[in-house]
Image (tube, helix red, strand yellow):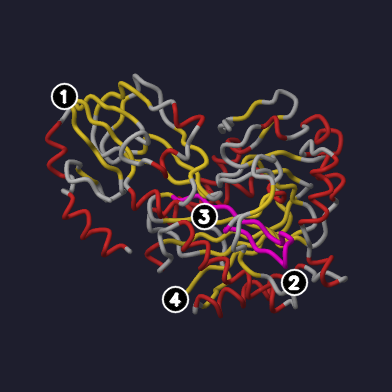
């Protein structure tokens, strides 16, 4: 089976989310192939889970530090994206992805595990959820959707399903500024200590983390080997681009007015 | 596991009809496939919904999925208890885990839904 590979450079946060959503919509309508997209962020960006409360984030601090805030179409809690390569996968049951949440995470995260192991990091899918479920910071809670190295969380992922099509997003984190992340998510001393103890990055393990080019190659080949697919470099279709153009505004969170088109609930 | 007095759709919602009102929730199979439910986003009473269209969303294990209405009509009651205790959907999907009640505008839509034996065959194929 052939998949499309889209590699984007640093992009505005709301645009990143709108592009992922546009590809999901096109896939749902049978107009897009299964797609792996690798991208970065124009500036450090907090993404909030679809139903997460904005109060989990210190928006004034983000404003001062030049950190954008956007909402993800996927579930889960807040992530501060900075020195990382972010991935999105759009696939579905017609591409042989199982429909169940746990089963689909197992398949797609299997490719992530393979990528980490190729880099020399002995990652595995978290078998037993642990950590602070109520925290606003995603990396303080490890679930069956996440990769761990020993007892430390290495990589988080989240999904949204539209009918039989799935968008899964996640990160390959090179380095993390834990102190800044703790302030952004209003973590207390104990939670900040937990963030240090229970998370690990590529830089922590490898010393010198891989650059974009290496990560792109390793991740792409890991998906090919694990899923038995062939990646073909591609770009958005014109229809996807139009949907993405129209959709950017709904993911943006205005920190001066605390307003957004998307929802905030839990 | 799958009560005989309910009707089911291919999106794994169930319908129970009581006095012209359709009570709707998700099946045991659906809650099992979702895993631990952490949030349910439901509409407001008074909203209208069409058969086959989304009436809300549900989040489990950082995964968001849509909820689809098996019938058309006006939503007359919403299970607000799921706001504070979404895990009820896992614990009691056919009882306390119900989601919305609808006054049906076209009860003949029920004929399009699956009886329990058809639904069991459907999920056996899907699993």
User: What segment is highlighted magenta in the picture?
Assistant: A144-161
What distance separates the C-alpha of mark 2 from that of mark 1? 64 Å
**Callout 1 and callout 4 share a chain:** no
Q: Report the residue marked by disc 2.
A: A213
Q: Report the residue marked by disc 3.
A: A167
As helix, strand or loop, the secondary structure at mark 3 comes to: strand
Q: Which one is earlier in the sequence, the residue at label 2 or at label 3?
A: 3
Quadrant where the C terminus of chain B is found in the figure: bottom left
Q: Chain of mark 2?
A: A
Q: Is residue A253 magenta?
A: no
**Callout 4 and callout 3 share a chain:** yes
Instruction: Please name the residue shown 80% across and 69% down the image.
Output: A211
Q: Nearer the viewer, mark 1 or mark 4?
A: 1
Q: Report the residue marked by disc 4.
A: A1
Q: Quadrant of residue A224?
A: bottom right
What distance separates the C-alpha of mark 2 from that of mark 4? 24 Å
- Is B118 on the left or on the right of A180, as rendered? left
**Callout 2 and callout 1 share a chain:** no
């Amino acid at each position: 089976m052939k998949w499309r590979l889209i590699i984007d450079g640093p992009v505005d946060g709301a645009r990143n989310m709108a592009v992922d959503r546009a590809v999901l919509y096109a896939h749902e309508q049978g107009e897009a192939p299964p797609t792996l997209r690798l991208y970065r962020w124009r500036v450090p960006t907090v993404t909030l889970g679809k139903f997460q409360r904005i109060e989990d984030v210190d928006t004034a601090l983000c404003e001062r530090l030049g950190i954008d805030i956007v909402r993800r179409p996927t579930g889960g809690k807040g992530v501060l994206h900075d020195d990382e390569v972010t991935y999105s996968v759009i696939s579905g049951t017609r591409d042989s992805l199982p429909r169940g949440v746990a089963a689909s995470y197992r398949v797609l995260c299997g490719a992530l595990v393979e990528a980490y192991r190729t880099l020399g990091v002995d990652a595995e899918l978290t078998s037993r959820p642990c950590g602070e479920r109520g925290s606003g910071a995603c990396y303080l809670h490890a679930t069956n959707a996440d990769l761990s190295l020993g007892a430390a969380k290495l990589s988080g992922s989240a999904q949204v399903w539209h009918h039989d099509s799935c968008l899964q997003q996640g990160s390959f984190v090179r380095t993390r500024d834990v102190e800044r992340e703790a302030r952004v998510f209003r973590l207390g001393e104990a939670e900040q200590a937990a963030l240090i103890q229970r998370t690990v990055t590529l830089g922590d393990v490898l010393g010198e983390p891989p650059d974009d080019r290496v990560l792109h190659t390793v991740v792409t080949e890991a998906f090919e080997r694990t899923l038995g697919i062939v990646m073909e470099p591609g770009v958005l279709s014109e229809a996807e681009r139009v949907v993405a153009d129209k959709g950017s505004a709904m993911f943006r969170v205005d920190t001066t007015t605390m307003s957004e088109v998307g929802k905030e609930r839990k | 596991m799958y009560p005989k007095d309910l009707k089911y759709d291919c999106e794994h919602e169930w319908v129970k009809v009581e006095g012209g009102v359709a009570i709707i929730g998700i099946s045991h199979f659906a809650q099992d496939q979702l895993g631990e439910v952490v949030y349910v986003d439901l509409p407001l009473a008074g909203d209208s919904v069409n058969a086959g269209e989304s009436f809300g969303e549900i989040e489990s294990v950082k995964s968001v999925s849509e909820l689809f209405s098996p019938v058309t009509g006006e939503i007359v009651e919403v299970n607000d208890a799921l706001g504070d205790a979404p895990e009820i959907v896992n614990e009691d999907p056919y009882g306390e885990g119900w989601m919305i009640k609808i006054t049906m505008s076209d009860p003949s839509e029920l004929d399009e839904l699956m009886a329990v034996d058809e639904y069991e065959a459907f999920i056996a194929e899907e699993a």
